[in-house]
Amino acid sequence: MKIIIIGAGEVGFQLAKLLSQEDYDITIIDPDKQKIMRAEDNIDVNAIQGDGTNPSILLNAGIQNTDVVVSVTGMDESNLIASKISKNLGSNKVIARLRNVDYSSKDYIINPSQFGIDEIIHPEMEAKSEINRLVIQNSANYVDDIDENLKLLGIKISDNSSLINKNLSTIKLNNKSLSFNIIGLTRDEETIVPNGETIIQKGDEGYFLVHKNDIEHLMYILGKQVNQTKNVMILGGGKIGRAIANDFQDDLNVRLVEINKDKADLIASKFNVTVLNDDGTDIEFLRLENLEELDSFIAVTENDQTNLMSALLAKHLGVKQNIIHVSHTEYIPAMTMIGMDAVVSKSMCTVNKIISYIKTDDNHEIEKIGNTQLESIDYKPKKGSRITFFKSLASEKFAKNAIIGSIQHKNGSFSIANGDSVVTSDDIVKVFALPDAINEVDKFFI
Amino acid sequence: MHLKSILNVVSRIIFTLGLTMFFPVVISFFYNDSHILSYIISSFITITLSLILFFFTKTKIKFSIQDGFATVSLAWFFAALFSTLPYLLTGVIDNFTDAFFESMSGVTTTGATIIQSSINLPNGIESLPKSILFWRSFTQWIGGMGIIVFSIAILPLLGVGGIKLFKAEVPGPITDKIKPRVQETAKTLWFVYIGFTFLQILFLFFAGMPFFDSICHAFTTMPTGGFSIYNESIAAYESIIIQYAFIIFMFIAGVNFALHFKALSGNLKSYTNDYEFKVYFFIVFFISILIFFNISNSNSQFSHENYIKSLFQTVAILTGTGYTNSNYEIWPFFSQLLLFFLMFFGAMGGSTSGGMKISRIVLLIKYSLTEIKRMIHSRAIIPIKIGNRTINDEIIRNTLGFFLIYLFIFVLTSLVLTFFNLDFVSALGASASAIGNIGPAFGDFGPTDTYKSLNSIAKWLLCFCMLLGRLEIFTILVFINSIISKK
């Protein structure tokens, strides 16, 4: 599949990097020479220096027979124009990043479809939703809603956990009363799709698929405390900070720290939160704020260093959960190692969302799971496909690097897959797999 | 440096080289020349050693830019080293230095040979077994488009660091990827290369050349190599059509392969729109006319034969092929000196030719001219353009550096050669010929001579120069620098 990426910033670069490792032909366009050289030197793509809103540059990049154009320049206006031109020049699918959320509201004066955009991504809103889920589920390091009842939780296994050095079959056997599935482990920046023999090691982060009512039980097994979130502090009144404040202002006790006086005034007048006009990296200020009573500390300023510094201070002062936003995606793996409970990056959220859009086709509904290499794929098994002949899932061998997570039945109810589950062609099956396993998995369902 | 990763990739490349040694096995079987076992053993040794190296260095491949240069340098060195096996095992060359010289001259597409009439080989090259003749040609063919590009095309595992390796091997100041993926680019280049090779084989065959001769010569024309299967090179063929076929295919081999690809995918104007191509064409035309008038004047017959000779030698030397169809050493000095200077030029960037490449020469001239302008308008901003492409400062700086180092190595090598009692003309010629990957030179190493008589230290020096020239100097120097600076 041919893809043109307009804009080689953080998102464009990471997107190109991830896609080029799979079977995609990528052309990346940016006017900035440095960025083009970075792309050329580090990833296997065709890098063109030029303006992505210029039709002749796009034609030169072979837009006529391109499947997907992704517009991720720093400016909304450029993205809109680039999208319009790309669509007119014959690109099949156009995905654009837009910062301004007004574009997606219904009664706004212009709408993205007029510009030929098929899918829009608002990075700040993606990051906000991810942070919100983490705040509510404050003992997890990653949270994803599979549907309203089913959750995917990424949880760091504590060093003294009883699960360590046990294989998954044993763990399941010991906890028969609980229905859950471990669909992935991250170990040393690598993602492992486990099977019954996989042994949990110190330092692993497990990805647990579980019903929302069972979360407390699961946390108990993992030796984690569950407490309801009441007090949160947001550092930084930027787009993300304001969006979080807006969502939580009615239910939680929210304090928002903003260093800029004018901005702080504006936020105070708009939202029902306590706005503190102070410096979040000032330890004296933080000390006075009684952080030990805080459930979540959310550092979302524009500056990665500020976020890191203040989150470390907050942890030191006794906050239960710290969530940090970083713009540089390269920092993500290092962050959890130095004591951050959860790391969110709007760039990574955007990249994941775009990859999900690109990969989703008639046969697959694909979603990339944040911070891992896993993808979740929804299958409606074809009549007579191999999987429907399985007497039970445990009875036969499934594809390598893939695992069946949950099954949605005809009546809409979800069940978490286990060895005894049976799949019929009326079900919708959610598979979790590494990208290179998908062709193999297809053979079971199509 | 990630030594394990480097050696691991090198081992894969050597493995593929080992596989290609089965081609001479087939030839040997076909002509029943009793050397079949030598090739099987050569292949066996190469494959076994590469597998041992592979399993000892199995690791998660990590690649820095430095590692890319190291890998390419080592891969070429080992390729030349293992290519000596057939020469040694068949016994056609009796000492290692000579075998290494022949083999390095092969893979770097230089075409300088040490094979001459001796007790073992009463008729020089013509007494070599067919399978060895083939192997000599084949080493040039594989070296022409590049063993790295070859490996990238067939080994998907090189994908990640591939672009670094690709850039370190493909000649010319600017490397274009003609496809988004480096593996696709490599495949396409090889596809075009193989296509032209087949075309030439057919051409030569229908022009009346024996089939085996056609294969061997096509295998040394497309890489601008220059090994022939006759002592007197192409002069052995009297047919005018064959002479012209060689001229045309040598010319084609000197064109940037990215242009061939664009032309083959329908854009025939790609040639005429390209500035470097126009300069290339002009040089061939202009210099061949100059030589034609010069030699015709001296033997006072303005014949078609003279023109073929001058055109043939111009293209052969400019592209670095190094075939000869006449003894240019009996030509007037003006023509000889012109050919000598052509050795530095080379043909287009992105081709299989040697030398400095025309685009670099053009760039240097244009840059020098802007300096004159700058003397008057000291703050003027003067973009340097090749065609309608503006060349940025980094490339200009790189080109200036390349030019200076190239000349420096040329001077140094000539000096060392004179130390071994060579005369002026022979030393300068041999040194320019080795760095430019040409083949024949002047004086002791003219079209009718070989390099056999050279002192063995001097042979090793020339081997080093050939490798420097083929990898466009920087690759090897970066590698050497990274070894020295480590300590």
Image: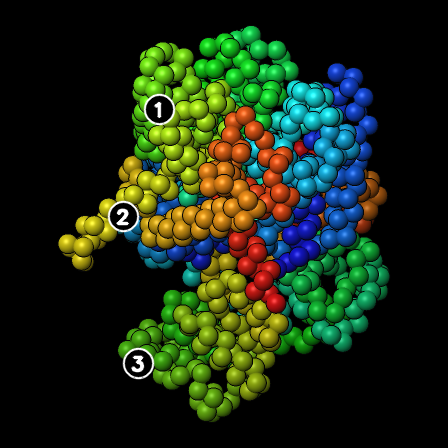
Measure how far apart labels 1 and 2 are at the Cα level.
Answer: 28 Å
Q: Is residue A273 above or below residue B234?
A: below
Q: Residues within 10 Å of mark 2 (few under 14, many from 20)?
A: few
Q: For the C terminus of chain A, which image quadrant?
A: top right
Tell me the element at label 2: helix
Residue type at mark 3: give it: Lys
Between marks 2 and 3 in the image, the one whose residue lies nearer the viewer = 2
Residue at image point 57% right, 70% down: A335
- Disc 2: which residue: B368
Going by the numbered disc 1, the residue's amino acid type is Ile
- Quadrant of residue A46 within the rendered picture: top left
Looking at the rendered structure, which numbered label has been put on residue B291? 1
Q: Nearer the viewer, mark 1 or mark 3?
A: 1
Q: Nearer the viewer, residue B95 or A282?
A: B95
Circle 3 sits on which residue? A261
Give the image location of residue A103, x and y in percent: 33, 52
Q: In which quarter of the view is residue B3 placed?
A: bottom right
Residue drawn at x 57%, y 60% as measured from the top left: B482
Query: Which chain does the numbered disc 3 sit on?
Result: A
Spatial separation of the CA atoms under disc 1 and disc 3: 82 Å
What label sits on residue B258 in the rendered view?
none
- Residue drawn at 31 percent across, 50 percent down: A78
